[in-house]
Amino acid sequence: MEPYENLKVGEKGAWLSIITYIFLSITKLLIGFFGNSEALLADGLNNSTDVIASTAVLVGLKIARKPPDKNHHYGHFRAESIASLIAAFIMISVGIQVIIEGIKGLTDEGNIVPNMFTGWVALLCSLIMFLVYFYNINLAKKINSHSLKAAAKDNLSDSLVSIGAFIGISGSRLGFYWLDTVTAIIVGIIIIKTAIEIFKEAVLELTDGFKIEELEQIRNTVSHNPDIKRVKSIKARMHGNQAFVDITIVIDDTLNVFESHQITVEIEKSLMEKHQIQNVQIHIEPQ
């Protein structure tokens, strides 16, 4: 039950993101409108789209908690990876929009100078978003949730966007109208870069990919068992936050069934202790 309990804990992070985004988007849109700040308005619209991305993560976590059924013998853990993909697509679209709006800003005269109060609001919102990121990234590492890690990266991107809004507003107040545009473009690039990293990690999992260095660490753990003559093959794939490992080992053909079984039990125990892997299939070949 531990994987399912971890997913339930992960939902707290998704809910925190959703509630924070709703509050910040309403605050930024209202203050940005009355304070004549295009940067803060754009930041508020960005947060409103993040509500959708965080909701996708929450739905993914809830689906992943469903136990195995007749059509999903390995459970629904990969719903997490699908949620990460959705979050990545939304982040990419927002990043492109931020860059396009920034380029359009090159031709704007910037006659309307925003109220500096909007800049302080942007800075405060950046701090709030960074605290949400800090909470979610630590929770994601604790429960090994890839979708929550994607949400945390989105939180960090949004914190940077708000800092960009603060710099742009401050620059406008000082007469450097170009600073708003340059900052917006840089922030847009950061958002897209983060989204691409999330996308690549989600696709790797959905296509049964597995990090080579982690696979070698698992192989080394198994090879240290003195009763194993050779590790013939080892394969692994990810289902959300759960690793499924298939191992073929070669042992002495004089060992009886009970002794052979004990070796597999020892392997399962060591993989659980050192790598937190609960799902292992071991095939034995005599020599």
Image: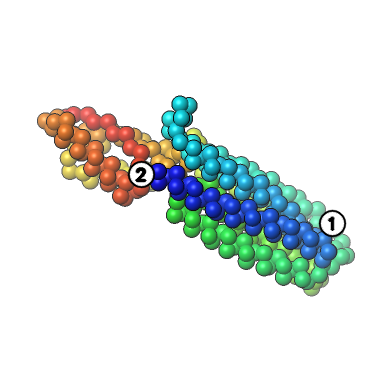
* Residue tagged 1: 107
Residue 277 — which label? 2
How far apart marks 2 and 1 lie (CA) works out to 56 Å
Relative to 70, 248 lies left or right: left
Would residue 81 be seen by someone viewing this image from the given angle?
Answer: no
Residue in view at x 79 percent, y 68 percent: 172
Q: Quadrant of the C terminus?
A: top left
* Residue 1 seen anywhere in this rendered image of the structure: yes
Classed neighbour count for the residue bearing mark 2: other residues with Cα under 10 Å, few (<14), some (14–19), many (≥20): some
Residue at 78%, 71% in the rendered image: 116
Local SS, label 1: helix
Residue 82 placement: quadrant: top right
Farthest bottom residue in view: 174
Question: Image quadrant for the N terminus?
Answer: top left
Q: Is residue 32 above or below residue 251?
A: below
- Residue 73, given in percent of the width and then of the height, sits at 43, 30
Q: How is the image coloured?
A: rainbow
Viewer-closest of 167 and 271 = 271
Foreground tag (2 vs 1): 2
Question: In front: 209, or 19?
Answer: 19
Give, as a three-letter code, the residue at label 2.
Ile
